[in-house]
Image (cartoon, helix red, strand yellow):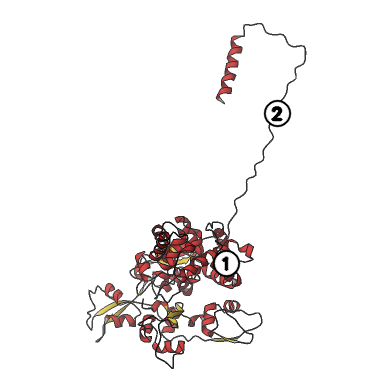
């Protein structure tokens, strides 16, 4: 460009200097002036970016883990393809949380396939509980969750708090990734079985001159199946069209918001502030075991995304002392702090802190201030049931042609797991026309009640197991038809129905 400019300027200067020369006569021949040939216009097509409206699509477009052709991968793929109803149920459970989890993974630049790990761990059930005392969407144990900053107390179990548990699980996975040679398959395997076992297996193979890829490692049977299950699931999600699978769409937008309550708050009041039903609030906050948030925090609640603004506006106008309903209680002769706490459905530690008590010493005739649930109609369904103020009624339903557990569960607004448990059905959900099913009301089902298969260990007794899971020995005998024997053997499998909020971890 500068060179062209130089010659143009030079030409002008030359003509200026030659103006004293004789002006040439016009030529007799006509001069043909040719217009410069304009280059052909190149049309560049700018493609509009694909609008991603479904979280499943957002996940599938980012998948990078190789789909290895392994026997177990193929077996699990076949299972998912043969059981599309399972993915329907999972998608329904995942709807409030999947977008949130995907966003957290993207912030950390972690493999997007990890968003599917809760399907393998818990079938996306935030209240899932295992016989190894792992709980929540990510199946965290208490030691692991505590190590990564998730607390649990009488009021609250952070392992079932989806945002808190997600942070802890992703922190744990990043830790394992660093500790297992920055190999994501190793890290995911270690999430199931522990970093020590994975690293030892790698060292053994190295010493023996064998391959150290995941598939060559000698690991526990459960772990050897755990990773293939995730990979098979990734393949099904990524290639849903190829396999003829229709995934229930989940809108690619925020579904939940985590709001700061600043201090302890009654859940019924919080639901009113958010213009929502108390049961909806409790469903989004399965980590809350009582009628209020924990006095020690975290002072947060999960709300539907579109309820955040109205909640925060109303909360800002609320006097902090009105967040709980307080009762002035006169101490009676024979009272203890723990007995008073049990009577008012609160914790002894909170009574002590609320009344500046250094210990459990109290004196008859003096007063305590105690936070209590709202009265009468303001009680939650669970609290009414506990006080025998509400008796849930069961429905008897006769199976018809075309029925499935999924269809029946949806019709009566209950879960498939509930139908199976209430009717002691096989896990494959097989139904016969004319069969009568018992359908309990939603009120009769404790949101934290789960069926657990427990493997008897050396030294176990019925009393010890009953104490651990906070159930009765009589129930253990009834659930497992042990009427003719009081003895159990190591390795024996027992079926338990437990309230996961009351397990002695």
- Assign a secondary structure to mark 2: loop
Which residue corresponds to mark 1? 74
Query: Which of the labelled discs sits on residue 498, or is there none?
Result: none
| Circles 2, 1 touching at the beta carbon (< 8 Å) | no
| Label 1 crowd bin: few (<14), some (14–19), many (20+), radius 10 Å | some
Tell me: residue 42, above or below residue 483.
Answer: above
Can residue 56 be seen here?
Answer: yes
Q: Please tell me whether residue 4 is drawn above or below residue 446 in the rendered image.
A: above
Q: Where is residue 265 drawn, in percent x and y?
A: 38, 70
**Residue 450 coordinates in the image, percent (x, y):** 46, 78
Q: CA distance from mark 2 to mark 1?
A: 63 Å
Task: Name the residue rendered at 32%, 77% in the picture.
Answer: 347
Instruction: Please report the residue visible at 59 percent of the width from the left and 12 percent of the height from the top.
Output: 14
Tell me, yes or no, if residue 275 can be seen here. Answer: no
Query: Residue 37, which numbered label?
Result: 2
Instruction: Tell me the SS state at disc 1.
Output: helix
């Amino acid at each position: 460009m500068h060179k062209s400019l130089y010659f143009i300027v030079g030409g002008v200067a030359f003509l200026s200097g030659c103006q004293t020369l004789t002006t040439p006569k016009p030529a007799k021949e006509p001069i043909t002036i040719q217009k410069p040939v304009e280059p052909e216009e190149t049309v560049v097509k700018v493609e509009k970016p694909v609008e991603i409206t479904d979280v499943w699509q957002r996940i599938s477009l980012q998948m990078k883990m190789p789909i290895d052709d392994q026997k177990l991968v193929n077996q699990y793929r076949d299972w998912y393809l043969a059981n599309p109803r399972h993915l329907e149920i999972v998608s329904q459970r995942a709807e409030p949380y999947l977008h949130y989890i995907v966003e957290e993974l993207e912030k950390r630049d972690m493999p997007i396939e990890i968003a599917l790990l809760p399907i393998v761990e818990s079938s996306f059930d935030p209240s899932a509980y295992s016989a190894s005392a792992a709980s929540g969407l990510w199946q965290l144990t208490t030691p692991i969750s505590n190590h990564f900053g998730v607390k649990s107390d009488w009021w609250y179990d952070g392992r079932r708090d989806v945002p808190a548990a997600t942070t802890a699980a992703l922190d744990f996975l990043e830790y394992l990734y660093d500790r297992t040679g920055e190999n994501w398959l190793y890290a995911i395997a270690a999430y199931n079985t522990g970093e020590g076992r994975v690293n030892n297996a790698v060292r053994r193979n190295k010493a023996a001159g064998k391959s150290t890829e995941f598939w060559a490692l000698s690991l526990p049977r459960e772990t050897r199946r755990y990773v293939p299950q995730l990979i098979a699931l990734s393949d099904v999600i990524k290639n849903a069209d190829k396999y003829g699978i229709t995934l229930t769409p989940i809108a690619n937008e925020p579904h939940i918001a985590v709001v700061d309550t600043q201090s302890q708050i009654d859940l019924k009041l919080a639901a009113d502030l958010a213009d929502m039903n108390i049961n909806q609030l409790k469903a989004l906050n399965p980590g809350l075991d009582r009628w209020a948030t924990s006095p020690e925090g975290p002072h947060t609640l999960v709300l539907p995304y579109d309820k955040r603004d109205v909640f925060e506006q109303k909360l800002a106008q609320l006097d902090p002392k009105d967040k709980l309903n307080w009762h002035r209680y006169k101490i009676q002769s024979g009272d203890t702090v723990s007995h008073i706490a049990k009577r008012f459905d609160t914790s002894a530690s909170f009574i002590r802190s609320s009344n500046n008590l250094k210990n459990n010493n109290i004196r008859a005739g003096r007063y305590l201030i105690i936070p209590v649930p709202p009265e009468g109609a303001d009680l939650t369904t669970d609290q009414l049931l506990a006080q025998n103020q509400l008796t849930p009624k069961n429905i008897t339903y006769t199976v018809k042609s075309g029925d499935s557990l999924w269809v029946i569960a949806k019709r009566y607004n209950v879960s498939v797991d509930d139908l199976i448990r209430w009717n002691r059905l096989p896990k494959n959900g097989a139904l016969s026309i004319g069969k009568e099913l018992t359908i309990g009301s939603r009120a009769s089902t404790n949101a934290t009640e789960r069926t657990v298969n427990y493997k008897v260990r050396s030294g176990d007794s019925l009393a010890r197991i009953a104490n651990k899971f906070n159930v009765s020995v009589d129930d253990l005998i009834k659930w497992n038809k042990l009427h003719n024997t009081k003895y159990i053997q190591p390795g024996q499998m027992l079926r338990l129905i437990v309230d996961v909020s009351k397990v002695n971890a």
